[in-house]
Amino acid sequence: MAYQNLDVKEAFRVYTGGNTVTVASTSKDGVADVMTVAWNCPYDSDEIIVILALSHTTTENILDTGKFVVAIPEALQKEQILKVGSMHGRDCGDKFTASGVEYELSQKYSFKVLKNCLAYFECTLSDKELLKKTGICMGHVENLYVRAGLWNEEFHNFKEGAKLALHHVTEDQFLSGGKDA
Ligand SMILES: Cc1cc2nc3c(=O)[nH]c(=O)nc-3n(C[C@H](O)[C@H](O)[C@H](O)COP(=O)(O)O)c2cc1C
């Protein structure tokens, strides 16, 4: 097999992340925020990791409150996730209001999350020092919700949902179900 040797700085582009997700949080004063995250993965059966720049409002919120909600948007929500991924909560206040992106309240935490996501995970922060030092935000999943009809009870898989999720390629380019989205 022939391989092309790339600059290691391209590693993240080749590796790609999992599903592009959003991370919803609230400030210590209760102001809602949400951002887009391409770099993320599972860590254990009920632990997930999102990688957050330390400068983001979301990071500050999670360090302050210890709680966040990760959601998996669907391909149709591409414009919304580009929008919430290009403005900072500290500049705009409640990002849902500022962006006009529709929301619903998560079931137990009552955090604002993108409306009609494929699934969402209500999480508590597992390791505050790790986030503070590195931007690795590990979440212990407290509650998990999947859009009705997308979970296969027999095989315990999310195949139908995964087909609709967005995978980030670069800039505003995504794939969904293996095709350009
Ligand atoms: C497609 C896409 C993927 C992104 N992935 C990440 C990521 O993995 N980690 C990160 O820290 N920021 C990522 N961002 C940038 C943040 O979403 C963006 O800076 C956001 O405005 C931060 O909001 P906040 O300051 O309100 O928390 C991404 C943005 C886009 C559009």
Image (spheres, rainbow, N blue to C red):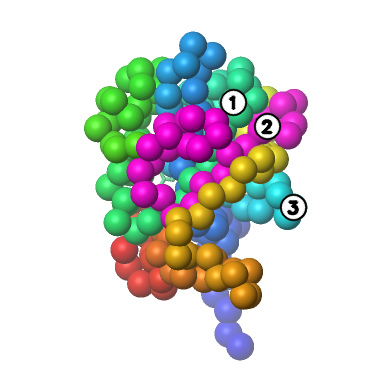
Q: Which residues are magenta?
A: 104-131
**Label 2's element?**
strand
Label 1 to label 2: alpha-carbon separation:
7 Å
Decide if residue 133 is on the left or right side of residue 68. right
**Residue 149 appears in which quarter of the rendering?**
bottom left
| Residue at the spot of label 1 | 62
| Residue at the spot of label 3 | 44
Q: Amino acid at mark 2?
A: Leu
Q: Is residue 10 visible?
A: no
> Going 38% across and 41% down the picture, which residue do you hit?
114
First in sequence: mark 1 or mark 3?
Answer: 3
| Residue at the spot of label 2 | 125
Q: Position of residue 142 (x, y in %)?
A: 66, 40
Label 2 to label 3: alpha-carbon separation:
14 Å
Q: Amino acid at mark 1?
A: Ile
First in sequence: mark 1 or mark 2?
Answer: 1
- The image's mark for residue 145 is none
Q: Nearer the viewer, residue 38 or 96?
A: 96
Callout 1: 10 Å neighbours few (<14), some, many (20+)?
Answer: many
Callout 2: 10 Å neighbours few (<14), some, many (20+)?
Answer: many
> Going 70% across and 47% down the picture, which residue do you hit?
47
Q: Position of residue 87 (x, y in %)?
A: 35, 29
Tell me the quadrant of ligand 1. top left
First in sequence: mark 2 or mark 3?
Answer: 3
Q: Position of residue 169 (x, y in %)?
A: 42, 59
> Going 54% across and 31% down the picture, which residue do you hit?
109
Q: Could you tell me how many numbered marks the image carries?
A: 3
Image height check: is 157 above or below 116? below
Q: Is residue 143 visible?
A: yes
Label 1 to label 3: alpha-carbon separation:
20 Å
**Label 1's element?**
helix
Decide if residue 28 is on the left or right side of residue 149. right
